[in-house]
Image (cartoon, rainbow, N blue to C red):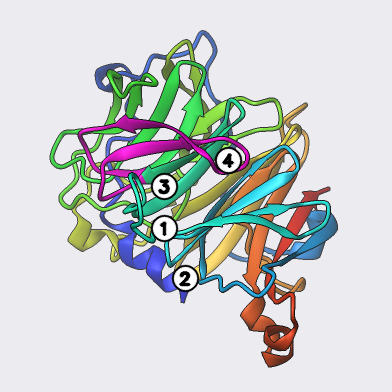
Amino acid sequence: MKTMVWMAVAGVIWTCWGCKDENGVKKGKDEPWVVEIKSFEGDELKVSDILARIDTVELYTDGKAMASIGDLCFLDSMVYILDASKAVSAFNLRTGRLCKQIRTVGRGHNEYIMPNAIASGGGRVHLMDFSGRCILSYDADLNLLHRTPVDFMMHDIIPVDDGFLLSNSSPGDREELIIHTDTSGKVLGKFLSADLSQAIWPVGKPFIRNPKGDVFLKAPFSNGIYVWRDTVPVLAYRADYGSLTPEQGREAEDFLSAGKVGTFHDFLTSDRWLGIFEYADEVYCHMESLSDGQFHLQGKLVRDVPGFYPQWQYGEALVGVVHGDDYGSEAKLQETRLGAILFFYYLK
């Protein structure tokens, strides 16, 4: 079902993301790392061929309810989960126990909130309040520290040294997709023109933080990945699909019939680039070595490891999550109540 959602919204996001100078993106001193991914239709790539190991952490809610999981982030030995009810639950990764849960109960100032994304950085947890057009910053114990107003609708967020990078959820015609603000909400820069016929962001994370702490950004259906450097995005990696590379500037209504590749997940570890993309209603994958460029795998993704669906990254690990209710009624009746299971996937 998620694959159908990705393809249904793919046509509204392919834009001028690959443009550089004219859209506020500077060219680096060196050319971006270009990987050719061609003649992949006849290949298969098993999940077991790309994974070295899988670790799991069970999270228990002590009887409290937790809705379906929308987003999560990590800070030191904690994981913070934002669910569909707009509650945020903080769990200790070592014990799996719930430490605190905050909800939009409306009993005081800043409690009528509708967060749609969560991120960590600088020792803080940041909630992006979509309807309130603000960023709420908390300490590790989920005590509110600061409210940063913004004057546009946001899709996602990532903290950087001097503020935040935000993805603009309503860029409109010829507006920018990425907005850089300081910690007070003042706009410092806008990057990457949209030129969208419809202003919709699809499911997916536009921001990546690698184990070294470098921040990368991308459009979920583009073939370019930019590194945030010297307060501007610089094109760092690009996947060349040959004649199947999506064409820039296509209208939303004819994108699905164009027969092109749609990319929606990329992960960058210390020595691997894993990209997941879709073509002709099939999900494919490629994996590259970032140290010497001598390692390359590609093919249709064969999920011989059940439940492989990473959406986040934590250090060297790709992270997926399954809600506790998916494990049956027995788990629901436990006094501690299984809220979710985290899966940490480590690449070969």
Badge 1 crowding class, 10 Å Cα cut-off, few under 14, some 14 to 19, many 20 or more, is: some
Could one spot residue 1 in this view of the protein?
yes
Q: Indicate which disc residue 203 carries.
A: 1
Which mark's residue is nearer the viewer, 1 or 4? 1
Q: How far apart in space, not on screen, are marks 1 and 4 (Cα)? A: 26 Å
**Image depth: mark 4 or mark 2 in front:** 2
> Which of marks 2 and 3 precedes in the sequence?
2
Q: Of helix, strand and loop, which one carries label 3?
A: loop
Residue 245's label in the rendered image is 3
Q: Which residue is mark 4?
A: 36
| Residue 51 locus on image (x, y percent) | 81, 56
Report the span colored magenta: 129-155
- Residue 133 covered by magenta stretch: yes
Q: CA distance from mark 4 to mark 2?
A: 27 Å
- Residue in view at x 28 percent, y 19 percent: 186
Question: Farthest residue in the bottom direction?
Answer: 329
Residues at marks 2 and 1, CA–CA distance in whole angstroms: 9 Å
Disc 2 designates what residue?
2
Q: CA distance from mark 4 to mark 3?
A: 11 Å
Judging depth in this view, the residue of 132 and 100 nearest the camera is 100
* Amino acid at pointer 3: Thr
Q: Quadrant of residue 340?
A: bottom right
In the depicted structure, whether residue 228 falls above or below residue 35: above
- Give the structural element (helix, strand or loop) at label 2: helix
